[in-house]
Structure formats: C-alpha cells, structure tokens
Amino acid sequence: MGKYDALFNALDREPRDSCSYSFAELEALLGRPLPNSARIHAAWWGNHVGNSQAKAWLGAGFRVRAFLSDERARFTRVEGGAEKRAPGHEGGLQEPEPKGALERVLARLTRRRPVFHSEADLQHSLALVMSQSGFSELRLERPFRFERQVINLDLLARDRQGERVAIELKYWTKAAEFTFAEEDFKLKSQGAQPLSRYDFWRDVSRVETLVDEGLAERGWVIAITNEGGYWRPGSSASATTDVALRLHEGREVSGTLSWAEHTGQGTKEGRETPLSLRSSYLCRWRDYSDLGPELDPEDQSPGPFRALALEVWPTEAS
C-alpha cells in the first residue's frame, strides 16, 4: 500500500467540490506524520506529478493549496475532472492544470527573445520576463557560500506564492554571424563540451543544496544552445572522458558523476571533484527557436536552438 493511498481514497469518495483538512487530520488519515518539509516548504504541496504525494490528489481529480501558517490544506476539484488512478498506478496520468511556471516563462522568453548575444544577455532577459510574469524580488548574481567558496547564483526570485526560486543558466553557442530584428549578432564558438556538461551538473548539485538547506523552495537549471552535440547521444566509447556527464535527449542522470579514469589532469583542472545528485533527472530537450526562415540568405544561420530545463524540488523527507 502506498503512503498516500488513504488520501487518494478519501478524495476519490469526496462528494463536495472542495474540502479542507488540518495537517493533524491528514496525519490521522495517513496513519503517519507528514514530513517536515510539508510544514515549511509550500513546494511540497506543488500540483505536479513529480511529487509522489501529489499523485494522490491529482489522481483523484483535485488540486491543493496549503496554508502553512494555519497548518491546513484545501483541496479543490479540477473542473472537468481528471483520469482517476491510484497513486501506485499513475501510468499516463496527466497533470490537471495548464503548463507550469517554468514552461510559461520559457514560452514567453521564446516569443520575446529567440536568440541572445551572451549568457548575461539571457540572464537579464529572463529576469525581465519573470518580472512581467508575476515574479518579484529578483536578484541577479546573488552570492551564496558553498564549501568555503562564495558562488554567485545567476538569479533568485519569488513567485506569486512567495516561494523562492533559485535559477542557474547556461548559454552554449557555435559560431554564427547574422542580423535578426535589425540587430547584429556575432555568436562565438565555445567548444569544450565536456567542461560545459560538468558545469551544468555542478549547477544542478548546487541548486539542490540551496533547496535542501531552505535557502530556496525550488530551483530551475536551464541550458539553451544551438550546438547539437549537447542533445545528441554522441560517442559512448570507452575513450570518451565525460560519458557520465552526458545530458543528451532521453538520458536519465542520478547519483555520483565522475570523469572517466583516463581523463587527463589538464582536461578536468578545477573540476576534479565528483558531483553528487540526490535526485534523478530525465533530460528532455525542447525546441526553443529557429531563426532560419527570418534571416537573410547570405547570413550565417545559427541553426535551431533547443533548451534543457530541469526543475529541482525539495526531497520528501527534508
């Protein structure tokens, strides 16, 4: 029996369109205490199937809003209902709400800025779009201390519910010169894909730490690139130094990520430390933009851009 089956069963039998439970009532229903994160992180109550507990109310056709100061949760039936499935049999379950905040922000960013001059350009553009999308208290290059080092987080913001979102960005390009929307672009070839992959997963690990330490309620790590070597599988030969760090389409990444044993010191200098991820991440690249049809035929087209956007959530037990 799943931990949250009792909640699914109660909501599945609920005749009303909304109902409210105190946290104590939920604990009595479940027969066990709620994790600490349920009382201190609103993200624990997120209406997305990435949360195992959310499958209980989403599967019964409800959404939830938690009031942490009152220790109470209100469940509201989704208009039109949802495909009902017990939490342990959620195959094919669809989240009964429109796109999440990350998808909405990326969609708006694509419309506003389909291409950027640099990572800093991306950073400022994303902050502007987020401010226009209901986010507040945006901080660029917010310093945090990691293992005796001060690291600047690309972006920290609060959403409409007051939750802090920690964001790290990557913008990897191959060389191209063109004019778009009456603006000249000269993208550089950045190369060194193994190092970039390491840096991406290091960002994921750092954002996990921020969330686990309560410095943010959730996080986003976003990479945008026109270099297909990132989303294509490429070589898996034993001579490849960064097999464990690959982030191509469809790859699931978790656990400890290390360089191959034969990797030279010059390759991994400054990045020797193995990376540890406490969650599992499925790499799903999405189309971001394609400027080709809008460019002058004589311009050097950058090719299509794609984005990898991972969400970092608190652990259930945290």
Image: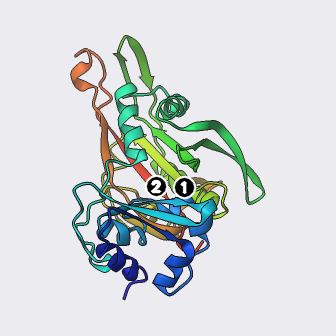
Residue pointed to by mark 2: 311
Q: Residue at x 26, y 61 (%)?
A: 94
- The vertical placement of 281 against 179, above or below, is below
Question: Which residue appears farthest toward the right when viewing the image?
Answer: 148
- Is 35 left or right of 228, judged from the image as shown? right
Question: Which residue appears farthest toward the top when viewing the image?
Answer: 182
Residue pointed to by mark 1: 218
In percent of width and height, residue 227 lies at 36, 40
- Is 37 left or right of 246, judged from the image as shown? right
- Is 297 left or right of 115, judged from the image as shown? left
Q: In this orientation, which residue lies closer to the viewer: 114 or 238?
A: 114
In percent of width and height, residue 313 lies at 51, 61
Q: CA distance from mark 1 to mark 2?
A: 7 Å
Q: In this orientation, which residue lies closer to the viewer: 118 or 65?
A: 65
The residue mark sitting in front, 1 or 2, is 1
- The vertical placement of 187 against 212, above or below, is above
Total labels: the figure holds 2
In percent of width and height, residue 308 lies at 39, 48
Q: Secondary structure at mark 2?
A: strand
Marks 1 & 2, CB-CB < 8 Å contact: yes
Residue 284 in sight from this viewpoint: yes
For marks 1 and 2 on the same chain, the one whose residue lies earlier in the sequence: 1
Residue 265 in sight from this viewpoint: no
